[in-house]
Image (cartoon, rainbow, N blue to C red):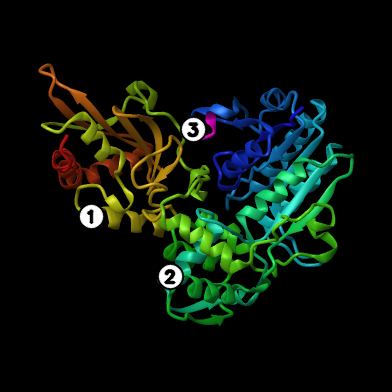
């Protein structure tokens, strides 16, 4: 009988792709998420069982783990806030205990390579501690440790790509002279699947990496060559700490500082496979061999160019980002809920109007003053937020839960309603709804509603400070979006 697998972190980059690979290998798959609604548009959703669960809620964990053979633990806080390691430890302990109670046969965990006899960053120490806590549960645990994962949509790859493409000459931190052993996402998924097929009662720790070991700076130069860019000039200096480096990465790449910091922390030390911990000591490598770095980059770039990116790092929840649903009752927000509502009739068909709505953001823009959006995005980046650089995964279609620049798709009723929740830093919560409707005569109507729930006096002041710009931003959108739909025809 096929093995029953539970996958956590399925909205993340690796977890989302792991589901597909497990299904291809004949596993029966259950997916756990705090909000299963965010999974509804994934291509595999009708082939899996989606359940609600939270690693901080032991009751929901036990329900999710009931009847499971192998449980994939793919949860990380990705936070820079003090005390995140306590949260991660509690989550791992809860998961291990629930797995033990439900007689799960094996836990598989993906962590990071941790150099021996080295002072680790708080993030890497927490990753190592997570593996130890899962093993301490008594459930046989396979901990796979990777450095840089090369694949379209991974945060590590996006950081490498944008740094290399945007900066032909770089003054960089000294960690770029550390050795790194990247691995292709294809090969990382192979090891994860093989680990789930393991039998026996032994626990394992296995480093996974591709065939190439190089300096991070050399990796950037090789990327430039594969991508057809001019040779890059890289000068390293000893003055940029990991925290300063994370600001630098955030300003140059789409990766926000809160995610850049743990990524940089993982590269401060050399991250290469320890021969004694090589996963190939107990797991078979791919039959056709591990992909070399250049081939992995070629595959990733092909997917980017063909707009065939299956999952992205940005689909995972942003630490500290708002998650409250759109309030419908002003009392819910203390009696104050600001709304900017605009509408316009159009001769465009509902289908044409929806195509424009669903394609909003990214390279398509917002049909209004571009420089105002860019200024807001830059201010958000300077404040440590996500800014506009996350773009879109696909230029035409959206999934619930994925990101569009500094928005997250909260609801997508195809042909009717797109609701975006703001993840930029602000003293309050904000939503933008784009709606296809009809008037009493049956004509197509475009409706646009911006909603803001302020937090404290600063929140109220923020709203009134930006109200003068609404005429330029929202006023232009309500005119230009229907006009763009009319040009499409139909």
Q: Which residues are magenta?
A: 41-45
State the SS at label 3.
helix
Q: Nearer the viewer, mark 1 or mark 3?
A: 3
In which quarter of the view is residue 145 placed? bottom right
Extreme-top residue of the structure: 440
In primary-sequence order, the first of circles 2 and 1 is: 2
Q: Which residue is mark 1?
A: 370
Q: Is residue 366 left or right of residue 216?
A: left
Q: Image point 68% across, 48% down: which residue?
A: 85
- For disc 2, the neighbor class at 10 Å (few under 14, some 14 to 19, many from 20) is some
What is the CA distance from the residue labelled 1 to the residue labelled 3? Answer: 29 Å
Q: Is residue 411 above or below residue 240?
A: above
Q: Is residue 333 above or below residue 151?
A: above
Q: Quadrant of the C terminus?
A: top left
- For disc 3, the neighbor class at 10 Å (few under 14, some 14 to 19, many from 20) is some
In which quarter of the view is residue 377 placed? bottom left
Query: What is the magenta segment's predominant secondary structure?
Result: loop
Q: Which residue is mark 3?
A: 38
Say which of 252 and 382 sits in front: 252
State the SS at label 1.
helix
What is the CA distance from the residue labelled 3 to the residue labelled 2? Answer: 32 Å
Q: Image point 80% across, 57% down: which residue?
A: 280
In primary-sequence order, the first of circles 3 and 2 is: 3
Q: Image point 53% across, 45% down: which residue?
A: 319
Extreme-front residue of the structure: 288
Say which of 81 and 436 sits in front: 436
Residue 35 makes an appearance in the image: no
Q: Are marks 2 and 1 in contact (CB under 8 Å)?
A: no
Image x and y of residue 324, in percent:
45, 31
In which quarter of the view is residue 56 placed? top right
């Amino acid at each position: 009988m096929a093995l029953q697998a539970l996958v956590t972190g399925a909205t993340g980059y690796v977890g989302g792709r792991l589901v597909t690979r497990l299904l291809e290998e004949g596993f029966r798959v259950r997916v756990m998420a705090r909000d299963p609604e965010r999974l509804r548009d994934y291509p595999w959703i009708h082939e899996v069982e989606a359940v609600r669960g939270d690693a901080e809620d032991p009751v929901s964990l036990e329900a999710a783990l009931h009847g499971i053979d192998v449980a994939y633990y793919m949860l990380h806080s990705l936070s820079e806030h003090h005390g995140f390691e306590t949260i991660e430890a509690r989550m791992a302990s809860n998961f291990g205990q629930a797995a033990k109670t439900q007689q799960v046969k094996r836990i598989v965990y993906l962590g990071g390579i941790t150099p021996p006899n080295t002072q680790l960053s708080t993030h890497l120490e927490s990753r190592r501690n997570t593996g130890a806590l899962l093993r301490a549960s008594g459930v046989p645990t396979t901990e796979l440790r990777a450095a840089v994962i090369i694949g379209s949509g991974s945060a590590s790859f996006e950081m490498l790509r944008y740094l290399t493409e945007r900066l032909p000459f770089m003054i960089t931190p000294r960690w770029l002279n550390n050795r790194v052993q990247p691995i292709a996402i294809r090969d990382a998924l192979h090891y994860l699947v093989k680990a789930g097929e393991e039998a026996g009662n032994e626990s394992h720790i296995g480093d996974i990496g591709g065939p190439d070991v190089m300096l991070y700076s050399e990796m950037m130069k090789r990327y430039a060559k594969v991508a057809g860019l001019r040779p890059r000039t890289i000068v390293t200096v000893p003055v940029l700490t990991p925290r300063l480096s994370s600001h630098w990465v955030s300003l140059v790449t789409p990766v926000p500082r809160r995610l850049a910091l743990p990524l940089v922390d993982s590269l401060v030390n050399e991250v290469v496979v320890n021969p004694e911990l090589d996963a190939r000591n107990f797991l078979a490598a791919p039959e056709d061999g591990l992909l070399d770095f250049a081939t992995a980059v070629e595959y990733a770039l092909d997917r980017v160019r063909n707009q065939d990116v299956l999952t992205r790092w940005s689909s995972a929840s942003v630490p500290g980002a708002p998650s409250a649903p759109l309030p419908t009752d002003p009392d819910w927000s203390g009696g104050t809920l600001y709304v900017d509502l605009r509408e316009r009739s159009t001769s465009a068909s509902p289908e044409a109007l929806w195509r424009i709505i669903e394609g909003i953001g990214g390279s398509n823009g917002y049909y209004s003053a571009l420089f105002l959006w860019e200024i807001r995005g830059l201010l958000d980046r300077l404040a440590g937020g996500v800014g506009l650089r996350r773009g879109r995964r696909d230029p035409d279609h959206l999934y619930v839960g994925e990101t569009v620049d500094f928005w997250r798709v909260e609801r997508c009723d195809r042909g009717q309603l797109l609701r975006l929740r703001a993840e930029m830093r602000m003293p309050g919560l904000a939503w933008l709804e784009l709606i296809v409707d009809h008037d009493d005569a049956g004509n197509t109507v475009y409706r646009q509603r911006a909603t803001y729930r302020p937090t404290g006096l600063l929140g109220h002041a923020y709203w009134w400070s930006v109200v003068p710009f609404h005429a330029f931003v929202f006023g232009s959108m309500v005119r230009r979006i229907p006009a763009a739909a009319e040009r499409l025809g139909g």
